[in-house]
Amino acid sequence: MILLSVDNLEVQYGASQALFGVSFTVAEGEVVALMGRNGMGKTTTIHAINRMVPAMGGSITFDGHDLLRLPSFRAARLGLGLVPEGRRCFAPLTVHENLIASARPGHWDFARIVDLFPRLGERRDQKAASLSGGEQQMLAIARALMTNPRLLLLDEATEGLAPVVRQEIWAAIAVLKRESGLAIVVVDKALKELNKIADRAVIIERGKSVWTGEPAGLTADLADRYLGV
Ligand code: ATP
């Protein structure tokens, strides 16, 4: 079943238009990668889904609800779990307090989070501000999971992290896919990892979705033309 459907989405920042028609769907349990070079509109797409920027055209449907007609707090309650770029956590709160602050009833609770990210258990009473970048990223993912979402939106979850920590994050995302059946939209530049984990890829070029398919179908020519690799 289709959980999220983005159709012909258009977004404008003041006088400058950033999205000119982004369309894609995410089925339940599916991992979809949003790809494209810097500044092409991936984060704007994620922000529009989360109602952080207004859409000026197109539609976004989540679990049968027209998201653009709902107030954003109601949209969030439908089960969108955002892991924002820049891994925002409450710096003065401890790991445990951060997690409790976002908790909603469901599968994910503190014990399950610690199974997924044992380091967060070890740092339970440490302030978020004192965590390493990788630990803060784990906490940002964990905070989104604690809301017990139906769709997890990961915006640049491995950006700026050391290779070994990146691997830990990718391993956790693989566990989520395998064991929780959560639908995931992931924005990242790590082609190799996305190829392994994504069921489908969507390429965004200058604010438009220009290609959708299985990652295996991403030929060297397409990667060169749209991703600059
Ligand atoms: P990156 O990988 O660099 O994060 P992206 O594909 O996520 O890139 P966006 O951040 O969505 O791209 O940016 C799309 C376009 O919208 C760019 O031209 C960018 O400069 C512009 N833009 C993004 N945020 C704003 C904003 N708050 N105000 C004005 N323009 C913006």
Image (cartoon, rainbow, N blue to C red):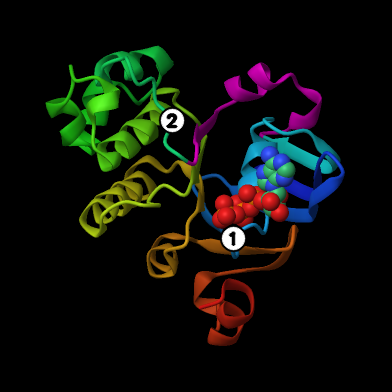
* Range shown magenta: 63-85
Q: Residue furthest front?
A: 15
Q: Looking at the image, which is closer to me, 10 or 149? A: 10
Ligand 1 near label 1 (Cβ, under 8 Å)?
A: yes
Residue 88 badge? 2
Q: Position of residue 51 (x, y in %)?
A: 69, 30
Which residue occupies 60% across, 64% down?
A: 36
The earlier-in-sequence mark between 2 and 1 is 1
Which residue occupies 32% across, 15% down?
A: 92
Q: Position of residue 161 (x, y in %)?
A: 31, 51
Assess disc 1: are there few (<14), some (14-19) or many (≥20) residues with their C-alpha within 10 Å of its C-alpha.
Answer: few
Is the N terminus in the top left, top right, bottom left or bottom right quadrant? top right
Q: Looking at the image, which is closer to me, 124 or 5? A: 124
Regarding mark 1 in the picture, which secondary structure is present there? Answer: loop
Residue 38 badge? 1
Residue 74: say if magenta: yes
Query: Is 193 rendered above or below residue 170?
Result: below
Q: Looking at the image, which is closer to me, 124 or 133? A: 133
Residue 208: say if magenta: no
Query: Is 220 rendered above or below residue 114?
Result: below
- Picture mark count: 2
Q: Looking at the image, which is closer to me, 198 or 107? A: 198
